[in-house]
Amino acid sequence: MPAHLNTAELGTVGVKVSSAGAAVSCPDFSLSFKSAARETRSKVRPKPEQRRHGTAPQADCTLASCLLQDSMVRRVAVIGAGVGGLASIKCCLDEGLEPTCFERSEDIGGLWRYTDSMDGGRISVYRSVITNTSKEMSCFSDFPCPEDFPSYLPHGLLLEYFRMYSRHFDLLRHIRFRTTVLSVRKRPDFATSGQWEVVTDTNGIREVHVFDAVMVCTGHFQEPYLPLAFFPGIDTRFKGQYLHSQEYKDAEAFRGKRVLVVGIGNTGGDLSVELSHVAAKVFLSARSNTWVISRVSDHGFPFDMVNTTRFNHFLDWFLPSAITKRIRFRKFNSRFNHANYGLASTKSSNFKIIVNEELPFCLLSGTVVLKPKVRKFTESSAVFEDGTTEENIDVVLFATGYSFSFAFLEESVRSLFDDNRSLYKRIFPPQLEKPTLAIIGLVQLTGSVMVGAEMQARWVTGIFAGWNKLPPTSKMMADVLKKKPPVKRNPSERENLKLSFISYTDEIASCAGIKPSVLRLLLTDPRLALAIFFGPCTPYQYRLVGRGKWSGARDAILTQWQRTLKPLRTRVVDDSSNGSDGWCWMCLVALPVALTAGFLLSRHPWPGWSPRAGPQL
């Protein structure tokens, strides 16, 4: 605990109150007297890169200038030590804040830390899971994955990467393990102080803390969503076993059984394929049109690195939607015709996309049989909407997703948002008197949510530190209402959370003042500009400018393909072809295309895009 904080014992045994000290009121800012005095005596808060490398300059600072420079936030509670929590701790430290992370388990990693047990209802991945996004598109923006790591990581390697990140930035000392957050409530003077009262439990000992801000990093995989009411007979007539995918760890328990998997998201597809190796028969029930793509794309490169580019994003914006949809469907069907497999039709406007290399072969070989929506269950069978029946079903496995409730938040706060669409930029409850509560990672993107969570944390901590500002409540509410559909969707449909990866990260980066300008780079560093515009939109791009600028970002971008190929070089074959001439011709063609695109976007920007790197709200 920092030296300037006081701890006062309450009458109840085992309960403590941690106080942040008295505060001075300013327009939207406050600062503890001791902190202000310390700042006055010493120096201006260093920039993040200076703090990391110990090169902070000395400068005189009056109390008034410090009060203007410093925000009201100093002590920050971070709830959860998964990927969002780790990024939040690190971003707090970069901004000179004092984070305390509460993690209810004994280790970091969140759901990516695999365990066989389900003690305390903890949710973790299943044993065989591998990431759907590649390492270059999923890593922290100033800490690339080791070059010898494969492009797609099993959960064990991803957890090791988290450990490396935590050790490198010395994050573990800020985490209190085996500590459950019981409640987060506004202090009586919240309207002026913005402070929160956080009650925790550690091995039966309750503590009450006071924090200037709270970052909730528990994600959206909190509570299994098991919609039994939509499946008549499942809990009244069906004699077999039914369970949620949360309880699934490996396939051995299903050997020789006839299994029905309900839900064709990424989890449903993965489990159907895995079960097909040991089960007598696997049926996969799907109610929506689903396009199945592979992690392996053109020429064997990772799919997301080939397709998630600013150039493709520009084409989506520039071309009519009917043309882009036709191009997309044609690409999806280039591997196999989805209509022949009963998966999706090009005539459907509502569809989802999952990542699975093996599912098409399992359908082709009959080890997995695709079925429509279940209408009802009998004692031992499932009746489907098309009138067909599958008999002798032993197990029904619901891959129906998760819901979130944030039960530890007080009701007056929890009622402000029913999903992330009620939050400003999917982060802030706009109705709060002070913007000192941030929900990190409650978003699904068409790319890595890890990158999105880190981007959110960087912007949020910049706001807490006073470098960034939010617009007035009225403007935030207007933005929320504009983006929130009037019809509430079924909780099991996660598409209401899914946003374009580049659009969203660019939007938050613009707010934080860290979005690179391709036009400016074309004039100063054409090679880097072309790599940014035509190459994969890797997270290093958001470390080129602004606060938190990283000197290694340029090199990380220009060497990303080498790190992708390095783990494959375990057997070298002779390839005498020289692609340098092709690269030169591509550059000659790409330069005018990039200039034209940049000019068009500067004249007609889409939401979240800006030709400048400065903040936009």
Image (cartoon, rainbow, N blue to C red):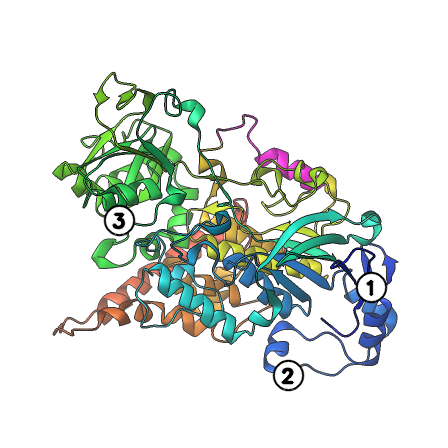
Tell me the SS state at disc 2.
loop
Query: Disc 1 versus disc 3: distance between alpha carbons?
Result: 57 Å
| Rendered-image quadrant of the N terminus | bottom right
Residue 467 in view: no
Q: Residue at x 34, y 72 (%)?
A: 147
Disc 2 vs disc 1: which is toward the camera?
A: 1
Q: Is residue 592 above or below residue 319?
A: below
Percent coordinates x, y for residue 306 in the rendering: 31, 55
| Magenta stretch, residue numbers | 475-490
Percent coordinates x, y for residue 302 in the rendering: 29, 57
Task: Say which residue label 3 marks.
Answer: 294
Question: Is residue 610 found inside the magenta-colored segment of the image?
Answer: no
Tell me the amino acid under the disc marked 2: Thr
Q: Earlier in the sequence, mark 2 or mark 1?
A: 1
Disc 1 vs disc 3: which is toward the camera?
A: 1
Crowdedness near tag 1: few (<14), some (14–19) or many (≥20) residues, C-alpha within 10 Å: few
Q: Which mark is residue 55?
A: 2
In which quarter of the view is residue 75 placed?
Answer: bottom right
